[in-house]
Image: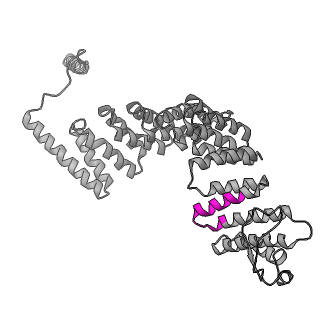
Amino acid sequence: MKMEKLVLLFSAILLIGIGCVPPPAGASTDYAPMSELDIKKRDRDCARNLSFASTNYQNQDFDGAVGNYKNVIDLGCGEKNARNLFIWMGRAYIELGKLDSASYVFKQGLKYLPDNTELLEIAAWNEGKQNKVENQIYYLDKLLSLDESNVKILESLSDIYRANGRYDDQLNILNIWLSYDQGNKKAIGEKKQAFIALGKDEFEVDRERWQQEPTNIQYGLDFADGLIDVGKLEDAIEVLDELQTYERYNEKVLLRLGKTYLDLGNIDDAQIAYEDLFKVNKTDYTIPLELSKILIDKEDYKTALEWAEKAIQISGGKGETYYQRGEVYFATAEACSEETLKFTDKIVYEIAFEDYNEALKRNFHRARTRRDFLKENSITTTGDWFMLPDNEKVVKPSGGCYNWINRSIERK
């Protein structure tokens, strides 16, 4: 009896051992192939579960949606329905606040759809929400490998590298960005900030861009503007002068030259720049207006008046231009009069007064101070006219200093 028990025990152990032996290498462990009928039934079940999942998602039943998507995977239809499954299953997990689960689902989906941009984008976004920066960069780099000119992805990578202090990496991305969109102001600004963060001269960004394409006027202007902004006016003049070798009468270059020369106090060169500018653009009244101001500084009042008259004509009579003409007469009287005003000085001041008054009528309110000052201090009074013969109803300024003035004042 004892022997029989031992035999039975040994037999049981032997059977168990045989049952646990792994199959030979390469042996198939798959189930028997499904019949066509079984496949059709499975596909119908998968389609029904996908439809249920879509309805669940639209009704914001995200738990239900996830459950039905899982059913599709369990039925073995995941790969076949990858485009309609993994993106939305991951989104459902995101809605449920289960970002780790969404990450897993997106990763599974990318096994079947490695180049699907929508899946890569949502996967990158999801990793960013979890502050998994390296994973986020991985997905964005994958997107960039599919389309290096994708500005949206380049901008995202630039932002991520900047936020994490990885300025060298950011510069690499910005260089790619600018190779496709050379004039992008954000990319240029970001590159300057990255240069500053790395202890480099921010002007090198614009200098580098312009020197690579010196005939590009806009690049040169950007460089000059940066220099002007920090007060490097002489350097800016050098850049603008070089730009003129490519386009002698470029309007933007001439305008910056004129303004920069004025800021440097070089009114002779400023005058030349504005005169050249007027040859290019005869419809902008501010150009003759500026020339009139320059010529007042040079005490060439007669020519200053001519430019002020042109400004009035071109502008259609803006108050600002009447004010400037008044400034010409005012400056003339200031230069020609002595401590005690003569009658003819007062006539010139009164001509200026009339222009200031007209400017004020035309809504140029800065003229009020000048007009009121002259009214109180410098224009003619009834007593001044009393000394003149009764037949002199109008008077024009006289004397060598005023002999070019053709306007007159009516008797009071």
- Quadrant (top left, top right, bottom left, bottom right) of the N terminus: top left
Magenta span of residues = 304-321
Image-quadrant location for residue 147: top left
Q: Tell me where residue 287 sits by quadrant.
A: bottom right
Answer with the quarter of the image where residue 237 lies: top right
Q: x and y percent of residue 131 in the render? A: 51, 42
Which one is in front, 133 or 74?
A: 133
Q: Residue 217 in the image: state x and y as whole percent.
A: 56, 38
Q: Name the residue: 33% across, 33% down.
A: 115
Residue 401 higher or lower than 214, as above or below: below
What's the magenta bit mostly, secondary-structure-wise?
Answer: helix
| Relative side of 76 to 314, left or right | left
Please indicate, yes or no, whether residue 225 appears anywhere in the rendered image: yes
Q: List the single residue furthest toward the right.
A: 339
Query: Is 303 above or below relative to 373?
Result: above
Q: Position of residue 196 (x, y in %)?
A: 66, 37
Most foreground residue, 250 or 138: 250
Task: Note whether 13 is above or below 75 in the view shown.
Answer: above
Q: Is residue 8 left or right of residue 366?
A: left
Residue 278 location (% of width, % of height): 61, 50
Q: Indicate yes or no whether the magenta region holds residue 307.
A: yes
Residue 229 covered by magenta stretch: no
Closest to the observer: 79 or 5?
79
Residue at (28, 48) in percent of width and height: 67
